[in-house]
Image (cartoon, helix red, strand yellow):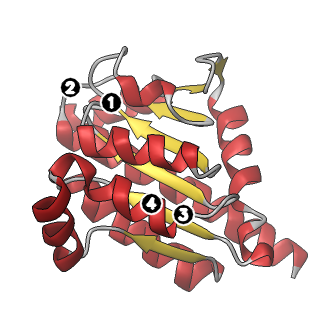
Amino acid sequence: MKPFQNLTELYEQITASDQRSGALDFEEAAGRALLMLKPLKDRRGQVILIGNGGSAAITSHVMTDFIRSLGIAAVTLTDESLLTCMSNDYGYGAVYEKSIEVSGRPGDVLIAISSSGKSENILRGAAAARKNRMGVITLSGFAADNPLRAMGDVNFYVPSFRYGHVEIVHLSICHHLVDCLMQEQKSNG
């Protein structure tokens, strides 16, 4: 039971902030994220998701939910041909940056997930999204001063150094956003 007790405590410790590192309570942060995501369907915008390892698996799962459950265009940039091409040509630090430069449009939303919050390719991807005038939502963990935590319009932070716990909470946050959007679509439709 201890691992589940730890997770329960961790959910209560999630913090959020905006780009100016102003503290937000979870509901306010989720509300801001939802305001960024809601108009995508009508505007025919897209969600671009990036992550490494377990976080990449989360991006694939969440991409499916956006497309299937919400009818919102979504793409994850983890295709092995794309990753190996970009890393061969530009270096692994640029794999997401280069794709976002080409694919990201103003008003699209990037969801950047990194347990450590310091992966170079995720940081450069978030910077490219900013340059393209995209909305940016980040999910990070580990050290409280990780650089990704200050890069998004909305930043969710999980105060743990345990990969599994951080990843579970990140997936839960993404599910919360999808569930809220689904509920709103049902109410309006």
131 to 3, vertically: above or below: below
Q: Amino acid at mark 1?
A: Gly
CA gap between label 2 and label 3 equals 31 Å
Q: Secondary structure at mark 2?
A: loop
* C-beta proximity under 8 Å, tags 1 and 2: yes
Q: First in sequence: mark 2 or mark 4?
A: 4
Q: First in sequence: mark 1 or mark 2?
A: 1
CA gap between label 2 and label 4 equals 29 Å
Q: Residue at x 27, y 30 (%)?
A: 118
Q: Give residue 60's mark.
A: none
47 to 36, vertically: above or below: below
Q: Secondary structure at mark 4?
A: helix
Residue 75 placement, left or right of 145: right
According to the picture, the residue beneath numbered tag 3 turns out to be 104
Q: Amino acid at mark 2?
A: Phe
CA gap between label 1 and label 4 equals 23 Å
According to the picture, the residue beneath numbered tag 2 turns out to be 161
Q: Residues within 10 Å of mark 3 (few under 14, many from 20)?
A: many
Residue 13 at x, y percent in the picture: 45, 22
134 to 32, vertically: above or below: below
Q: Amino acid at mark 4?
A: Ile
According to the picture, the residue beneath numbered tag 1 turns out to be 141
Q: Give residue 100's mark.
A: 4
